[in-house]
Image (cartoon, rainbow, N blue to C red):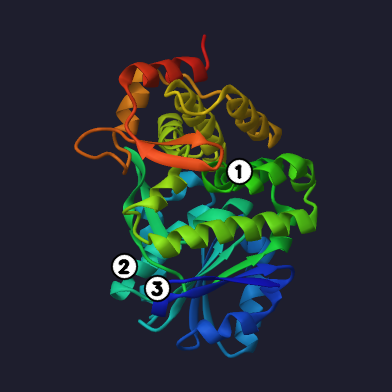
Amino acid sequence: MQTLTVALGDRAYPIHIGSGLLTQPELILPHLKIKQAAIVTNTTVAPLYLERVQNGLIQAGVKTVPIVLPDGEAYKNNASLNCIYDALLQHRIERKGTLIALGGGVIGDLTGFAAATYLRGVPFIQIPTTLLAQVDSSVGGKTGINHPLGKNMIGAFYQPQLVLADTDTLNTLPERELSAGLAEVIKYGLIRDPTFFAWLEENMDKLLARDEPALAYAIHRSCQNKAEVVAADERESGQRALLNFGHTFGHAIEAGMGYGAWLHGEAVGTGMIMAADLSQRMGWLRPEEMRRARALITKARLPDTAPNLGNEKYLDLMGLDKKVEGGKMRFVLLKSIGEALVTEAPNAQLQATLAACTAHG
């Protein structure tokens, strides 16, 4: 097991990464204020891992309440949030009780937001079971739900007590979900870690083959990058916005196609190609770097062409992005591989990127 720390003073917390962690309740117990926990999961993950986590806690004398939600991005909404509240109230979960998120990014975001708002804040723990959640969404305290008009528009910054990333859960992950997670891994290389990007170019085949040492290294390096950024800028007032590389375009794809039609990582992968294209049009990213970025994203089996929503629809959806200031859209773009910035983009270049990167016909 490897352990990292998200350094947030008295709210610092560990990230444990390794094999077989779900059967080690001793990693969870020190983070429970009382022996009461609600485990939020979904219909896909519950049959695989709920009993494993629940039994260990029950044997330690913890009263557990399972809450099983439907699976999918389409359910990351207010209705699912209310299902969590209903169960917490019915089972009289107290303020010192802990919510445990067992699942991917949707479950983590929903559970974190429920924890932030139930009784005005109760502790929660992240047990991410997808690659995307292990390398990105479980770390950093971003929680929330989607709105029909925009992704993650309702939420809160609320840090977990612990992140427990069991690499064994990746053995049951569908190939499409594995590739979706690799999008967020590639993102760290593009925005701040060129050495890691080069390592990914050399080792992408191993990651796709689920080579355990390669996956463990990629997860550790990704979490290390995110932990450093979060510790420096918890509430996204500065450099943390760089973690949204590809997300302005990606969130527009998700909302425009209907939540769940594209996986988040698929939309982000294509969004990163669009952001790289715009970076090149701004005179920053060199053609060779653009080629490398596109090649790695496509090697990860991610789509490289965005759906044709129409330029007006894209602009409308991107106008709801959380980086908008003074009514002006801002994008995370690349000066080079490993160096990113947040900036506005002239309309002509933006329109050209949309025309070049979307499907036609």
For the image, the number of numbered tags is 3
Please name which of the two marks, 1 or 3, marks the residue nearer to the observer.
1
CA–CA distance in space, label 3 to label 2: 12 Å
Q: What residue appears at the point 68 percent right and 34 percent down from the top-left corner?
A: 301
User: Which badge, 3 or 2, is on the more N-terminal residue?
Assistant: 3
The circle drawn on residue 117 is 2
Q: Residue at x 34, y 31 (%)?
A: 317
- Across and down, in percent, residue 252 comes to 41, 33
Tell me the CA gap for discs 1 and 2: 33 Å
Q: Of the two numbered discs 1 and 2 on the same chain, state the one appearing first in sequence.
A: 2
The location of residue 84, given as percent across then percent down, is 41, 65
Res 40 seen here: yes
The 10 Å Cα crowd at callout 3, few under 14, some 14 to 19, many 20 or more, is many
Q: Amino acid at mark 1?
A: Ile
Tell me which amino acid carries mark 2: Thr
Q: Quadrant of residue 109?
A: bottom left
Element type at mark 1? helix
Q: Residue furthest top?
A: 361
Apparent side of residue 204 relative to residue 61 in the rendered image (left or right): right
Return the residue at label 1.
186
Q: Is residue 48 above or below residue 293?
A: below
- Residue at (74% x, 71% y) in the render: 20
**Which residue type carries mark 3?**
Leu
Q: Position of residue 148 (x, y in %)?
A: 34, 39
CA neighbours of label 1 inside 10 A, class few (<14), some (14 to 19), many (20+)? many
Q: Which residue is mark 3?
A: 88
Q: Which mark is residue 333?
A: none
